[in-house]
Image: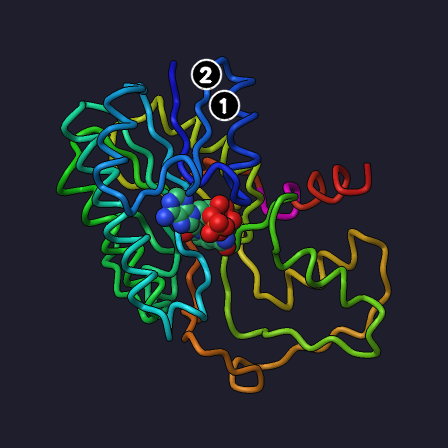
Amino acid sequence: MKVLVTGANGMLGQDLCPIFEDAGAFVIETDVDTLDITNAGQVKQVLSDIRPDLVVHCAAYTNVDKAEEDLKTAEMINVTGTENIAEACGKLGITLVYISTDYVFDGTKKDPYKPDDRPNPINNYGITKYEGEEAVRSLCEKYYIARTSWLYGHHGKNFVETMLSLADKPEIKVVDDQTGCPTWTVELANGILKLLSKPYGTYHVCGSGSTTWYGFAKEIFSQAGLNVNLQPCTTEEFPRPAKRPAHSVMDNGKICRNWQAALKDYMELRNF
Ligand SMILES: NC(=O)c1ccc[n+]([C@@H]2O[C@H](COP(=O)([O-])OP(=O)(O)OC[C@H]3O[C@@H](n4cnc5c(N)ncnc54)[C@H](OP(=O)(O)O)[C@@H]3O)[C@@H](O)[C@H]2O)c1
């Protein structure tokens, strides 16, 4: 199987490409320097020249807070860029995997969100990622939308590394009123491989179980064997430009392992 990956230099892309290669795929890695998804002509040209069987679309504008002041760029990459990819895939009959986010939900549901629950994004990043989903649904027949959340991986700036870098501080305050599903990029990549044998449609591919950012931090320090002064705080005490959903827990249909087990493997590899 020939697989073209967009945003291959990103945190997810760098873990996903070798996992797909190990599974027997011939992987063509692209990023903004070789395939700028906002350039419709280039997208058409590259996809019709290469004719992959599958495109895994990881490229995105991912700075949630910056998207509040720079909606234009977020729209250009997450909406127009995704339209370009979806249109070319639709016309050429290529299967498309689009990576979306728990931030398409408003976080008011008490139970875990199911894939067919109604999205209602509350920040610009979530709005643009949801519009990307809609573009995929309208322009492609053969698509998987994989919503993930609270992503961390060895090749990007992420919450686990931020927490570990703060371990020598006298006190660390972490938000305890936002609940979600931490997801290791390797789990997500393996989950996407599993999706390919399922019917086309929208899925949740995130760690099983849920926790708050405080609970996540507590587990990180516990697994690292570090004794720190960790204190819970509220979102109000730690204001950010973009609003976050309070409860964006997603039902993943057991496609990924428990988030604590995945974190353990991440920590072991990190210390290797
Ligand atoms: N990180 C999370 O917590 C999280 C949570 C839920 C969903 N997601 C989704 O998961 C996917 C992967 O996220 P990630 O954390 O791996 O993101 P990332 O590390 O920011 O990687 C995104 C990649 O896309 C590239 N890119 C940006 N603009 C582009 C363009 N015009 N053309 C081609 N490539 C472009 C980026 O290049 P530059 O670095 O040069 O800009 C980067 O290499 C995204 O769709 C994201 O929305 C992430």
Horizontal and vertical percent position of residue 86: 22, 38
Whether label 1 lies within 8 Å of ligand 1 gets the answer no
Q: Residue at x 78, y 51 (%)?
A: 223
In the displayed structure, would residue 203 be above or below residue 174? above
Of the 4 image quadrants, the one containing the C terminus is top right
Image location (x, y in percent) of residue 231: 72, 77
Taking the spot 69% from the left edge, 42% from the top edge, the residue there is 266
Tell me what residue is drawn at x 53 percent, y 56 percent.
210
Q: Report the disc number at residue 25.
A: 2
User: Magenta stretch mostly in which secondary structure?
Assistant: helix
Q: Magenta segment, which residues? A: 258-262
Front residue of this view, candidates 92 and 186:
92
Mark 1 is surrounded, within 10 Å at the Cα level, by few (under 14), some (14 to 19) or many (20 or more) other residues, namely: some
Label whose residue precedes the other's in the sequence (2 or 1): 1
Q: Secondary structure at mark 2?
A: loop
Quarter of the view holding residue 52: top left
Q: Is residue 54 left or right of residue 178?
A: left
Query: Disc 2 residue type?
Result: Ala
- Residue 222 lies in what quarter of the image? bottom right
Residue at screen point 31% across, 53% down: 78
**What label sits on residue 163 in the rendered view?**
none
- Residue 20, disc: 1
- Classify residue 128 by image quadrant: bottom left
Q: Position of residue 36 (x, y in %)?
A: 35, 42
Q: Using residue 130 as the reference point, say whether residue 102 is left or right of it.
A: right
